[in-house]
Amino acid sequence: MPRLQEDRAGKFLKSGVLALALVGEPAAAQETERRWYATGYVSRWANTDILDVPERTFTGNLSFQNANFAGVGLGRVLVPSFAIPLPGTDFAFRGNRIELEGQVLRHFGRQDHWEGVLALMFRTGQIPLAGGLSMNLAFGEGFSYASAPPRLEGSFRVEPSRFLNYLAFEIEFSHTSLPGVYFVPRIHHRSGVFGLVAPKDSGSNFIGAGIRIDLR
């Protein structure tokens, strides 16, 4: 009888440990999800409208000005992983996040000023590729302020504006061999939003890339 009770106690203990492990998995996953991240960026002025960037990139028809910036960004996850269900189906887009990102940038070359950016970022879940590589897509909307009127953003028709709307489009590439490290191609766009914030034809497009590190 003591031997039977001992076996039952052992099975009960093992079941309890297994149950705790299963319950703890979602919490552990949340703990490993990043909360903060830092990025170093470099970018160059592109002579194109933002809607033409994809086509010109694939056709190799992009031209650039000698106007560049380098800087750093700090991001904070405001809304951790959430799902977006597809209406009428059992399918959902999972792992989406909403983040807040601030940037401090130094322009050099044909422009010489500082720029500060604050934007909300919507980021998709991870999209697996091949060989341990994956990516996600992100779109940002916010505001940009230059310490001086940007020289190349002006023309004979438009005075350059320090304060403009800001858009960001990026792809975040990662590999399983370097967890928490990302390569980030990015489009940095300033504009007057068709005259809403500043006169039409105000703005610029910079194309560049950065290295991002999770700070947890």
Image (tube, rainbow, N blue to C red):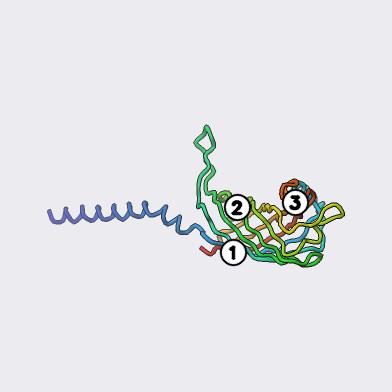
| Precedes in sequence: disc 3 or disc 1 | 1
Q: Which residue is mark 2?
A: 121
Q: Is residue 15 above or below residue 72?
A: above
Query: Which residue is depicted at the point 78% across and 61% down?
Result: 150
Instruction: Tell me if label 2 and label 3 are in contact, CB under 8 Å.
Output: no
Q: CA distance from mark 2 to mark 1?
A: 14 Å
Badge 1: how crowded within 10 Å, few (<14), some, or many (20+)?
some
Give the number of the disc on residue 38: 1
Amino acid type, label 3: Ala
In what element is the residue under mark 1? strand
Query: Which residue is depicted at the point 42% across and 52% down?
Result: 26
Nearest the camera: 214 or 165?
A: 165
In what element is the residue under mark 3? loop
Instruction: Tell me if label 3 and label 1 are in contact, CB under 8 Å.
Output: no
Q: Position of residue 65 (x, y in %)?
A: 82, 60
Give the number of the disc on residue 198: 3
Q: CA distance from mark 2 to mark 3?
A: 23 Å
Instruction: Tell me if label 2 and label 1 are in contact, CB under 8 Å.
Output: no
| Precedes in sequence: disc 2 or disc 3 | 2
Amino acid type, label 1: Ala
Nearest the camera: 123 or 152?
A: 152
